[in-house]
Image (cartoon, grey):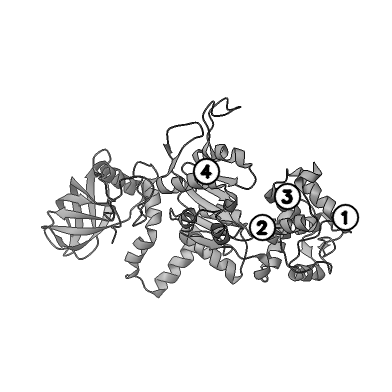
């Protein structure tokens, strides 16, 4: 089992204060082993059963005060548990421990033989980048659940209720049961998504987000970032399907001066821009096979190499990937590397389509309308007929389509209520069919689709987003109307 905190040899003078027979007693002791959560103390005259105060003198900081409790005798001394103090005190303690830390070829937490010294241990998942200034904060967040578990044996049910209430109302300021105010939902599927985000966000694990286009994968990535220890670092998003394959490598990994025609100066890529933060790779299923190999290398050793460079650079980035394609099918067809899939698939969150979220459609519609009405004058409610139309619609474009429909309804409403006509929701909407563009015959619909494709240089992901439909739906329209890119030049 991995240690909770790294332990070092040291020689520290300290004072211990406790109450004995109603009198304050103070003793001088020596600390010879130390971690954030415990120490080995020599010189205590008695086995203390109650919590006491220990004041070690840290070089460069002076005396700091900690609360502690004796656990057992060990190696001729007394092993004590240290309780967490204020942030500055724990930082001073960590600075001293880090200065005494001797790094070998194995993880100081679990002993696993790994000489990388960067990223996280492959066995115990502990963060190992000890040189980072934010190391202590990240380590505490990653081990919080274990620290809390150690203390739970001293708590009763009343304590549990008070702690949960305090965390929700005072620390997290929870108003909705979601990790982000734009991430709205109360359906069982979405509550499960919120729970998984809260669980994995504080870790360093790569996350794979699955779901149809428009289900909120980008919002999920944002929530994972803002709820992690990297929240003060950058969140960099890249749509792998929106960048031409010839430019994507330089966009992701950067390039050196003279690497290719037009490279007049060196430029950082998205990986370097996200150093210390999170990189969100959307539409990962469209990543070319040559770049899949480079991404796999990064996930294994955290090294990137700019186009035109012969040297590698270590980057501290957490990768969150997303796709609406079937990666299992892509692997079977040889279009996606299985080893990359299993690297990305260490933790998967599947976002349910809007048609499976029940009354979330109405909840989201009200949320969008409230947001629009807060920025400009317009209706603030839906008609009962409008709400029923929202419930009936199959929403093939998911949340993105719903937002666009509500925006249209807000702008087109002539009275105080948004109805189905304003949102272009009516009996002509067929289940599981893409929302029809504002045309009345097949020819004009085809022309509209061609127009949108041309405006977006035939980048399917961008055109589908503008049409408020999924990429598979757009591919179906292209096949239905026999649209050929070369025929429309």
Q: Which residue is mark 1?
A: 443
User: Sequence-wise, which precedes: disc 2 or disc 4?
Assistant: 2
* Horizontal side, residue 86 vs residue 164: left or right: left
Quickly name the residue at label 4: 234
Helix, strand or loop at label 2? It is loop
Q: Considering depth in this image, is 187 or 473 the residue closer to the camera?
A: 473
Answer with mark 3 or mark 2, whichever residue precedes in sequence. 2
Q: Counting residues from the N terminus, which is met first, the one under dot 3 or under dot 4? A: 4
Q: Kindly identify which residue carries mark 2.
A: 214
Q: Percent position (x, y) of residue 413? A: 84, 58
Viewer-side label of 4, 1 = 1
**Residue 92, located in which quarter of the rendered image?**
top left
Residue at (89% x, 58% y) in the render? 441
Q: Residues within 10 Å of mark 1 (few under 14, many from 20)?
A: few
Give the answer, above or below, for where 456 lies relative to 390. above
10 Å crowding of disc 4: few (<14), some (14-19), many (20+): some
Give how far apart the Cα atoms at labels 3 and 4 are.
28 Å
């Amino acid at each position: 089992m991995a240690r909770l905190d790294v332990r070092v040899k040291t020689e520290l003078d300290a004072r211990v204060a406790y109450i004995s027979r109603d009198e304050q007693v103070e003793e001088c002791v020596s600390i010879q082993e130390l971690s954030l959560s415990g120490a080995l103390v020599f010189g205590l005259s008695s086995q203390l059963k109650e919590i006491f105060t220990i004041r070690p003198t840290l070089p460069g900081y002076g005396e700091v005060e900690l609360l502690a409790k004796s656990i057992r005798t060990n190696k001729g001394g007394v092993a004590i548990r240290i309780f967490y103090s204020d942030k500055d005190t724990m930082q001073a303690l960590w600075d001293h421990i880090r200065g005494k830390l001797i790094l070998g070829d194995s993880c100081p937490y679990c002993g696993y033989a790994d000489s990388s010294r960067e990223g996280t241990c492959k066995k115990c998942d502990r963060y190992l980048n000890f040189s980072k200034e934010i190391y202590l904060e990240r380590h505490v967040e990653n081990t919080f659940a274990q620290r809390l578990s150690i203390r739970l044996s001293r708590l009763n049910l009343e304590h549990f209720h008070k702690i949960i209430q305090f965390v929700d109302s005072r620390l997290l300021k929870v108003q909705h049961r979601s990790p982000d105010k734009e991430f709205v939902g109360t359906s069982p599927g979405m509550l499960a998504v919120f729970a998984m985000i809260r669980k994995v966000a504080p870790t360093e694990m790569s996350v794979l987000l699955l779901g149809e286009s428009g289900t909120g994968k980008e919002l999920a990535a944002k929530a994972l970032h803002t709820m992690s220890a990297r929240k003060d670092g950058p969140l960099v998003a890249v749509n792998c399907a929106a960048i031409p394959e010839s430019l994507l490598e330089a966009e992701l990994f950067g390039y050196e001066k003279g690497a290719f025609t037009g490279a007049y100066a060196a430029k950082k890529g998205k990986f370097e821009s996200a150093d210390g933060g999170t990189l969100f790779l959307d539409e990962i299923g469209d990543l070319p096979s040559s770049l899949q190999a480079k991404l796999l290398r990064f996930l294994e050793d955290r090294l990137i190499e700019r186009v035109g460079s012969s040297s590698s650079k270590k980057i501290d980035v957490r990768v969150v990937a997303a796709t609406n394609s079937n990666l299992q099918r892509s692997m079977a067809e040889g279009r996606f590397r299985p080893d990359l899939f299993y690297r990305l698939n260490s933790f998967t969150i599947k976002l349910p389509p809007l048609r499976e979220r029940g009354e979330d459609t109405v909840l989201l519609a009200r949320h969008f309308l409230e947001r629009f009405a807060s920025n400009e004058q317009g209706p603030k409610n839906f008609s009962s007929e409008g709400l029923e139309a929202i419930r009936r619609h199959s929403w093939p474009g998911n949340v993105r389509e719903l937002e666009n429909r509500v925006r249209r309804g807000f702008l087109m409403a002539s009275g105080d209520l948004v109805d189905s006509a304003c949102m272009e929701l009516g009996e002509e909407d067929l289940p599981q069919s893409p929302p029809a563009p504002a045309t009345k015959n097949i020819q004009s619909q085809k022309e509209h689709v061609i127009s949108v494709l041309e405006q977006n240089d035939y980048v399917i992901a961008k055109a589908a987003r503008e049409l408020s439909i999924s990429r598979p739906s757009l591919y179906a329209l292209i096949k239905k109307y026999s649209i050929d890119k070369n025929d429309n030049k």
